Image (cartoon, rainbow, N blue to C red):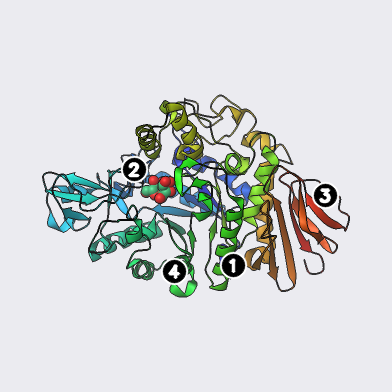
Amino acid sequence: MNNFKKSTIYQIYPKSFYDSNGDGTGDIQGIIQKLDYIKSLGVDYIWSTPFFASPMNDNGYDVEDYRKINPLFGTMEDVEELIAKAGERGIGLMFDMVFNHTSTKHEWFRKALSGDRNYMDYYIFRDGSPETPPTNWTSKFGGSAWEYVPSLKKWYLHLFDVTQADLNWNNPNVREELKNVIRFWKKKGVKGFRFDVVNLISKPEVLEDDTTGDGRRFYSDGPHVHEFLKELAADTEIEDMITVGEMSSTSLEHCIRYSNPDEKELSMCFNFHHLKVDYKDGNKWELMEPDYQKLKELFETWQTEMEKHNGWNAVFWCNHDQPRIVSRFGNEKKYWKESAKMLAVCIHMLRGTPYIFQGEELGMTNPGYEEIGEYRDVESIHYYHILLEEGKTQKEALEILGQRSRDNGRSPMQWNSDKYAGFSEKEPWIGVPENHRFINVEAENQDADSILNYYRKLVDLRKRYTVIQDGGIEFLFQKQREVFAYKRLLDGQELIVLNNLTEKEVFLQEAIISKGYECLISNYEQDGKDSTLQSLRPYESIVMLNKQVG
Ligand code: TEU
């Protein structure tokens, strides 16, 4: 069995994790200083988002040099120290490879801009008149996906910010350059990689207008993507390392291929379908209550099909691009603790490798920024203006950002109840929510019943029970929208996972006989009697294992 099936991964957004030098921004030494905390969670790997040289228009996802460290975060020595000290604690580092695009400050792009044909072919340049972009595709951050360069009389493609130019993977030299980046970090002792939007790397040779959409159908899971990934993995010998691809608007069929070990592409995939069930008509910028029935169906399809075809999911609720889950699908006020724990269980007992995003283990909430001046994210600021242009009032636009902005996941990690949550001595680069007074590591360490200690137990359960690591999965109560429930099965072991997604008590359509089962974990007191389970209290969650073989 692959080691990553037992593993849990902790995601760090360094800019917001811990500031060691008092400049208001988190840094690499800050991560080093908190390694014992990370170790105390029981996690096996840290995935850190990028800290490479970058103008930081997209907080490091605009890479200027893949082999240099952004001085804002520290030095190469700091990174080497981080890899070594994490290694001493049995924790591997996964680095974030942003290979779909580079910053327009990257040397390759600067050479391209100067008219060097060799480097122009590193990117996706197309002819066209200054008035009309080559296609009608739009950027993920809003506006056209093309930018005109008058000196070259050409346009270049940028699926993200205008300062993030898409690389031309059809050029073998580009693929070689990127392999060398992997080899460089492997030599430094990195144990795995996360590949940013890696299913977008293969664009067709001939680009055409999208008459029914924004262009994504032409380049998501594009024509040569599987070939390119196989080549990358084989030539850099990363097939046995832990690798995860971030897949944007992907399909199940493709994710099976990306993650099936026989294909030798990646260990696992992130997909985002389950995080769109509160997008009205698929639009992130239109608010809607979450559709729990759809959420359940999506998990059922992805979990059971991936099992059937030997694929592997990365399972998660939160990352640096997403709002906080307790504010989103939970209840951050009355049932803060219950709902955060319940949501954790939904993910951590699944078939897949769970990811915890910094602060999720504390039940951190959306920060509740109230003015546009409090936002820092390029996407949020673009969309604020787009929403106003579309006729929304400022109040409405801010209400939408308050729920949808990527900055919701980027507020500083809450270490204690001090002024800046113990994150920094100085005012941080982005605001600290008031609730750090009671939602913080120090307070939760002292409380045996805290969300933090619950996450620690969940990580430990996965280590101890093979049925969680490797068991099959069957979904229960498919028609009962409030109940997210499934069974895990392995060699006679049977694990039952029941979760009430709502703040109302729910009566189970079929009673569950709990005789012969022991409760492994629950967010409510269980009476311990062998009995029949007829209902679940608000946000109640129970995990039970049959005793005979457990
Ligand atoms: O994100 C990919 C992506 O498509 C979305 O998550 C996007 O950030 C947005 O939410 C669309 O509404 C990855 C990184 O995780 C993100 O931080 C980067 O900005 C992006 O790629 C570009 O590198």
Query: Disc 1 marks which residue?
Result: 304
Badge 4: few (under 14), some or many (20 or more) residues near its Cα, within 10 Å?
A: some
Distance between mark 2 and mark 1 Cα atoms:
35 Å
Distance between mark 4 and mark 1 Cα atoms:
24 Å
Give the numbered dot on residue 142. 2
Reading the chain from its start, which is encountered first: label 3 or label 1? 1
Q: Secondary structure at mark 2?
A: loop
Distance between mark 2 and mark 3 Cα atoms:
50 Å
Which numbered mark, 4 or 3, is in the foreground of this view? Answer: 3
Query: Residue at the spot x=15%, y=58% of the render?
Result: 118
Query: Residue at the spot x=50%, y=26% of the render?
Result: 425
User: Could you tell whether 115 is left or right of 192 in the image?
Assistant: left
x, y (%) of residue 255?
A: 46, 65
User: Could you tell whether 93 is left or right of 540 in the image?
Assistant: left
x, y (%) of residue 415?
A: 58, 34
Reply above or below: 463 against 59.
below
Q: Between 466 and 327, which is closer to the camera in this rendering? A: 327
Query: Disc 4 marks which residue?
Result: 239
x, y (%) of residue 41?
A: 62, 48
**Residue type, numbered disc 1:** Thr
**Residue 187 visible in the picture:** no
Q: Between 35 and 340, which is closer to the camera in this rendering? A: 340
User: Could you tell whether 492 is left or right of 440 in the image?
Assistant: right
**Residue type, numbered disc 2:** Gly
Give the numbered dot on residue 526. 3
Reading the chain from its start, which is encountered first: label 4 or label 2? 2
Reading the chain from its start, which is encountered first: label 4 or label 1? 4
Q: Are marks 2 and 1 in contact (CB under 8 Å)?
A: no
Distance between mark 4 and mark 2 Cα atoms:
36 Å
x, y (%) of residue 9?
A: 55, 54
